[in-house]
Amino acid sequence: MSILALLTRDHFKLAQESLLAGDKSRAAEEYIKAGDHQRAAKLAAELGDGPALIRSCLLGVLGELPPGFETLNAHQVGELAVAHGHPHKAILLFELARDYRRAASCAVKLHQTVRAAQLFEKAQAWADAAFYYEQNDLYRDALRVLQEEARELVEESSSHGRPARLVRLDDVNLKRAEILLRLGKVTAAVTLLGDLPSSVESARLFERAGKHGEALAAYLDAGRPEDAVRLARISPDASRLEAMIRLRSGRPAEAGDLFAKAGLARESAEAYEAAEKWAMAAYRWEAAEEPARAAEDYLRADRSLDAARCYAAAGQPDDAAATYATAGDLGAAAEIHVKAGKPQAAVTLLLSAGEAVQAKKILAQLPPGHPEMSEMTLAVVPMLLDIGLAVDALAALRRLPVDEVRNRLTPAALDRLYWEGRALEALGQGKAAQALYRQVARLRPTHRDAAYRLSHPQRPAVPPPVAASPPSQPLPSPPPAVEVQPIPAEEERDITVGSRLAGRYDLLGELGRGGMGRVFKALDLELGDLVAVKVLMESPDLLRQQERTLREVQICRRISHPNVVRVFDLGRFAGRVFITMELLEGQSLAALIAHRELLSFERIRELLAATAAGLREAHAQGIIHRDLKPANLFATPRGLKILDFGIAHRSGDSRLTQAGFVFGSPHYMAPEQLLGQPVDSRSDLYSLGVVAYELISGQPPFDDPNPAILALAHLRDPVPDIRRLRPDIPDEWLGFLARLLAKQPADRFQSAQEILDALARLPAAPADAADALLVTARAA
């Protein structure tokens, strides 16, 4: 300590020197002597010296120590300091008295807001602390104290059941969310807001977070439709938000269309469900790759076949089979059972409906030695005999493994012998049949009517009834009686109904004819199936036609898809060719369009989607159809089928693909195809665009009897405005058609999958353009 300061009694300098020496207590005494009571009080507060603090504050406030000052406590002196206008001293006293709230209020008067926030936090006055922290941009501190308040409120409400505290908790969490947004923690803020009831404040915070859908819903819940509309108008996803407004306004069907436009398949499906538009909902569930939900809605729409298809896609074979059976498609139901490893269920189902031929086909697919083969065969054979298919019955029996059955007395072994005898008897082989009946009677004389047949050989009918799994329903009628005359190979030229082709196919009726050949409905005698047979006609260009036919078989057998016709085989007779394919029931799209009844946009979308799905599979195999047109698209109860791949192009195949050669139908050909240039999958998509235009309007976009003028129209004319033919077309469909029918391949959809995605977004009904969004919201 300096001698000069001691000599001159400079207490202020002595106090500073004591501070430098680390002696705060001595420094406080010197500050008192120097008359600097504020500094003395501050040091006393730092030292926790209550008496010194009180003494310093009294001297600073009153200028003297009043009598009995020793009895005063810190809180009393603090109030005295406030009364005399010394809030800075009062803060220290209130802190000493642990009255932090009173200290904080003094700090506020002094505009010491950071200190006030800290004192409010000590007082656990969380809201006030957060307020002053936020005023000073100390957002992390504000968030911390609000989290502490939220924790306390949760504990109080759960332990004491105080609902009012929950209201405060919502307010606190709203403030927390706002601060989180200030800190850039958007995800945490949105999560917090998601647990809060809707309000104008939460809607605004959602909007700040860029969550326009949540904001719009909150605005509507809070009774602020004008804000919901404002938000919808300025948002990039306006279609989705407009859909939400319509949904909340009690117009779910319109909401479904708008969700579809925005590409939101799931939301669209849910909206259509709310509107009880079951078929449209099902279609959207398929687009959302949720086939099980699609199946449920298809059932509600009384579209059992579609429901069954979706159940199968969802991996629910039992539901799929049951639904197919309910819809009357027992063949499909049986096929599902077989794929699920339940051939016996398939056979039982078919036999219950008297479909012995179909049941026989399933048996033929099973490997020898299948554990259920014997039981199923012995159930099928009696019905085959009842409908006169003794050869098939005998073939089925002889597929059973040859073991010790002839020396065993099991019912199955005896039935095997008995029914083989019945089949031989029906084929006129009485002696062989008698030998089997004799063996059965020797092993068990009472088995069925074997003994009776021994004593009445080769009788056309048996008086006693035969208990042999009779059909539970009347047997189906055989095909219409047609007198069949086999045709000698050298005379197989003029084929007519009633002919037997290649010794195997009985031609039952003509289905149609064209420039290349005729198509017949036929019975396949080997498999017992009804099929379609296309027979090439004699012509100077027969070799080229045969090449096309061979290509069609080769290509179609590469494509396995429900929307592509199945081609079974190719046959030859007398130097000519025929092919067999699945027999289709329904009508071509050309016939559908010719009815002159405009189709609904939902039906058009289904037909286009099925065609695009078939093309997607063909294109994946490197196959370009090149002749897509309504006549080659066939609508059946089980879905659309693409026909006639006779001029299709396969990658790497140079036949019929030389540059400069034009193949196809001019009304439906892409510009590059008309020019004889190389084609790819996008050429098929242009043809699909022409089909789409015709399905919507009833006529193709370009039509002229002069092929040259027609080709020029495709090459250079703009697509005619379809609205003159179909004024109710939604605007979204216009853009879809324009892209399909673009002159340049690069401007079109680039794949069939893109078309499927686009179709999923198209509305199935025209939107009401006059229905303003604001009116919709206020109608709620």
Image (tube, rainbow, N blue to C red):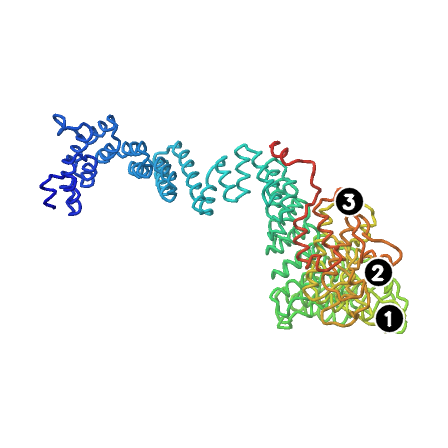
The one nearer the camera, 54 or 333, is 54
Check disc 1 and give the amino acid type.
Leu
Q: Which residue is mark 1?
A: 542
**Is residue 77 something that shows in the picture?**
yes
Instruction: State which mark lies toward you, 2 or 1.
Output: 1
Instruction: State which mark lies toward you, 1 or 3.
Output: 3
The one nearer the camera, 381 or 54, is 54
Q: Circle 3: is it few (<14), some (14-19), or many (20+) Cα within 10 Å? A: some
Task: Say what secondary structure mark 3 lies in.
Answer: helix
Q: Earlier in the sequence, mark 2 or mark 3?
A: 2
**Is residue 533 something that shows in the picture?**
no
| Residue 568 image point, x, y percent | 75, 66
Which quarter of the figure has residue 170? top left
Check disc 3 and give the amino acid type.
Arg
Count the labels in the image: 3
Q: Earlier in the sequence, mark 1 or mark 3?
A: 1
Q: Which residue is mark 2?
A: 508
Rendered image: mark on residue 79: none
Look at the numbered discs 2 and 3 and tell me whether their residues touch, using CB distance below 8 Å: no
Task: Say what secondary structure mark 2 lies in.
Answer: strand
**Residue for point 12% across, 42% down:** 5
Task: Say what secondary structure mark 1 lies in.
Answer: helix
| Residue 273 image point, x, y percent | 62, 42
Look at the numbered discs 1 and 3 and tell me whether their residues touch, using CB distance below 8 Å: no
Query: Cα distance, mark 2 to mark 1?
Result: 25 Å
| Residue 508 image point, x, y percent | 84, 60
Check disc 2 and give the amino acid type.
Leu
